Amino acid sequence: MFTGLIREIAAVKSYHNNILSLQSLYKPNIGDSIAVNGICLTVTKINSNGFEVELADETRSIIDADRFSGKVHIEPAMAIGDKFEGHIVQGHVDCIGSVKSITKKENGVDYRIEVPQRCIAYIVPKGSIAIDGVSLTVNEVSADSFRLTIIPHTIKETLIGSYKIGTKVHIETDMFARYIAHILAHKETNNSPTWEDIEKIQSLY
């Protein structure tokens, strides 16, 4: 589990044969989970100046491999006892979004992100969303896109300030929105959870 608060911006050394090699100050252990641009991956090798992770077939079928060039966001998985900020992020990408517009404001920048129709149901106004692994708040939702207002601090500490119109981004929608939508969609089946079951799930977090 992650929080969507970026630990470091790492540099991509190489990406071939499903192996992503990163140059990073952060020193993980082999087997650790780490989110790279919002994707939960497992550390398979430690190098003198970074580490490597391997991407499975299922992961590669969902993500945008072009995001593995230049620099990337990284966040280690939470440990028991860590301070919890941001929101619950699983590192499971739901879809690929595209920057539709960028509008400078007095104290931030508005980004409108276009997403596939199937993802809109899980994006809630004032709810949480992860963009390339960054925990953000949704300001507005339309039929095929949503709007974010990014404050100067976030632009400085992440790669979002480098996005341009047409930039592809990894989208992870809110976990609870996905769970509840799935439960309601299957409420007619015999094994459907009750609202009491949903409350128990929520209490775990």
Image (cartoon, rainbow, N blue to C red):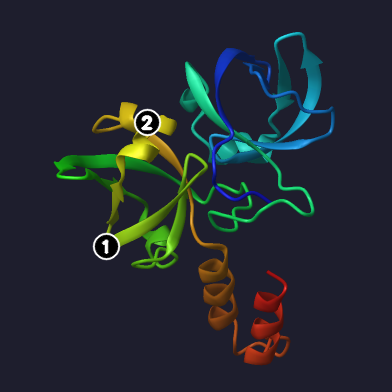
Structural crowding at the residue carrying mark 2, measured as other residues with C-alpha within 10 Å and reported as few (<14), some (14–19) or many (≥20): few
Question: Residue 194 versus residue 201: which sits nearer the camera?
Answer: 201
- Kind of element beneath mark 2: helix
Q: Residue 156 carries which label?
A: 2
Q: Is tag 2's residue or tag 1's residue first in the polypeptide sequence?
A: 1
Quadrant containing the C terminus is: bottom right
| Amino acid on which disc 2 is placed | Lys
For the question of whether residue 158 can be seen, the reply is no
On the image, which quarter does residue 102 sit in? Answer: top left
Residue type beneath disc 1? Glu
Label drawn at residue 140? 1
Residue 12 location (% of width, % of height): 56, 16
Foreground mark, 2 or 1, reads 2
Residue 163 to residue 131: above or below: above
Q: Which residue is drawn at 68% across and 91% down?
A: 196
- Quadrant for residue 203, please give it: bottom right
Query: What is the spatial separation of the Cα atoms under label 2 and label 1, in whole angstroms?
Result: 23 Å
Q: Is residue 64 left or right of residue 23?
A: left
Q: Can residue 204 be seen in this view?
A: yes
Residue 87 % position (x, y): 55, 58
**Which element type, helix, strand or loop, lies under badge 1?**
strand
Place of residue 188 in the rendered image (x, y in percent of width and height, measured from the top left): 60, 90
